[in-house]
Amino acid sequence: MKLKNKILCTAVLLLGAQSIIAQNEEYTKPSWFFGVAGGANMNFFTGTTQQLSDDFTALTPFHKGYGTGLFIAPLLEYHKPNTVFGFMFQAGLDSRRGSFKQVTANSCGCPEDLKTDLSYITVEPSLRVAPFKGNFYLYGGPRVGFNIKNAYEYQTGINPAYPDQEPLPAVNGEFSNTKDVILSMQIGMGYDVALSSQKNKTQWVLSPFVAFHPYFGQNPRSSESWSVSTLRAGAALKFGRGTMVVSTPVSYGFTINSPDNSVVEANVRETFPLRNYVFFDLGSTAIPARYELLNKNQVTDFKENQLDAFKPKNLSGRSTRSMTVYYNILNVLGDRMQKNPAATITLVGSSEKGAADGKLMAQSIKDYLVNIFSIDGNRIAIEGNDKPKIPSEQPGGQLELDLLRAGDRRVSIESNSPDLLMEFQSGPGAPLRGVEIAPLTVAPESSYVTLSVKGAEKAFTSWTAEVKDVNGKVKTFGPYNQEEVKIPGKDILGTKEQGDYKITLVGTSADGKVTREEQNAHVVLWKPSTQSESMRFSVIYEFNSSDAIAIYEKYLSEVVAPKIPTNGTVIINGYTDSIGEENNNTALSTARANDVKQILQSSLAKSGRTDVTFKVNGNGENPELQPFGNRLPEERFYNRTVVIDIIPNK
């Protein structure tokens, strides 16, 4: 008895374990389905039939009718889960039976009735399309029908004038000239309703459907004009087998970067040059979305020195940080024209499609300045050219023409009004006066605490961060779905300047499992620098020019040089865009930087000064060092630059 009890207990435990394993198993959704489809064919008869067989003709032709027939067919279906396209095939019984509308014989006034029991073996291959990659699907394809029954029953009724007359017997027969095979089509839609969960290997699905079979090709006979249209409604019961999902934990990595904001760098007050070009997308004369465009109500709040409030949303990479000033060029221009009512401009559009297209580009900018900034249209002239006055693409050029031509599809802003232009500049290529960017007074994004959860999008449906201070007070941030989140230090610290925290990642996976991981972090509040300011100036070049530095000589001598403090350091970095050979670009950037150094050094020497230390770098097209990207033409134009950093001695 003891042995029997042990065997019984062991069996119960094994069955229980098997049950638990089965409950925890999960299978993929099937790709192949087998089953049966059934429903009702609602048949609509049109056309004409009268001669029913070779030896029988009705007294009066029949034209319209209606009836319901049975549809039942085995089916085969293939579609991968979460995909658009699949395949369906069904073949079975397809009844097109019905009754014609009663007619009256002119010869005797007798009513006439005609019924038909028309049936086929139907073969229906279809393309299955799930537009949303879900349960709803559309399908369509050919229908081939093989006739298996074409019987009719014709009945002549009693003449109303002779009510006592004996009715004639019904005439039963088969239609003559019946087509053995018909070729038509169908379109339909359905919806898959799962009847079993993915815990089951064999999964059942019920799919209600509706389909339409138009009259094209559905003429049952080769004589007369009788045709059939069918609306089919029903459901398919089908099953398929999934494959077991092998659950493996999805790995993730949790790291925290809390910047040491206690080491404060010197403030930088930058004068950012404003290139007088607006670049247009190929095939469009509309101002590109990457340029910041205001509405009329925002104009009064616009200020050149507060452009962070008007930061474009359509930028990525380094352009988000560095080109906000440039992408506000039209707003800066409109604001300056409002403040200087005597200033006039000419907008010159250049397009590879010709002068007319270039003029449309210029007109779009004029419309913006007139409609948004209320600038008098008489102050803005427009022109159209097929090439800019200072083109990037040169005659005989063979390499990188697409990039060069993108740089030539632009509108140049030309003016003789000194209030708009860079100091000491004039002519069609003169940049607009630069915009002075004040030092930061709010915490930059680089000062935020960064939480990185690599693999979070696969490992978790969502995650939160619990931040606990030394007193046990907890703040919760989230929930998040992305892999990286930046939290401003002040949101963690509140009124404190720094503190130690335990930051806990709390991730929830798709099956509801909660994962917790804790790390320590020291958080320091960012503060504006109290150190003396350094200054930054830039000069920008047209394509492939180094000797053009001569146009900046007066600017460098009379604006930049006087701002260099006693015993200061001047760091000069030259850059180019990515067009051309790398070695040539390095040499070109070095030549540009040395030209700037020579002008500044000469200007200081004329004042008897030799106290300044110069450092010169030619960085060429090095993507790690370039100020901007190279994807857009304006980025490439701004990379053709020399940046001058003036650093005080202390």
Image (tube, rainbow, N blue to C red):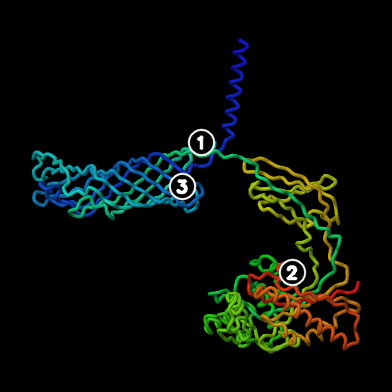
Q: Give yes or no for contact between labels 2 and 1 (Cβ–Cβ under 8 Å).
A: no
Q: Amino acid at mark 1?
A: Lys
Q: Which quadrant would residue 426 be assigned to in this image? A: bottom right
Residue 608 coordinates in the image, percent (x, y) = 91, 87
Q: Is residue 189 above or below residue 21?
A: below
| The residue positioned farthest toward the top in the image shown | 1
Q: Which quadrant would residue 314 be assigned to in this image? A: bottom right
Q: Amino acid at mark 3?
A: His
Q: Is residue 312 above or below residue 3?
A: below
Q: Residue at the location (66% across, 48% down)? A: 462
Q: Residue at the location (47% across, 44% down)? A: 31
Q: CA distance from mark 3 to mark 1?
A: 17 Å
Q: CA distance from mark 2 to mark 1?
A: 57 Å
In the image: residue 375, left or right of residue 538: left
Q: Mark 3, residues whose alpha carbon is within 10 Å: few (<14), some, or many (≥20)?
A: some
Q: Is residue 282 above or below residue 444?
A: below
**The label number, if any, that marks residue 625 in the structure image:** 2
In the image: residue 509, left or right of residue 168: right
Q: Which residue matches tag 3? A: 79
Q: Give yes or no for contact between labels 3 and 1 (Cβ–Cβ under 8 Å).
A: no
Helix, strand or loop under label 3 = loop
Q: Which quadrant would residue 613 be assigned to in this image? A: bottom right
Q: Mark 2, residues whose alpha carbon is within 10 Å: few (<14), some, or many (≥20)?
A: few
Q: Which residue matches tag 1? A: 201
Tell me, yes or no, if residue 635 can be seen here.
Answer: no
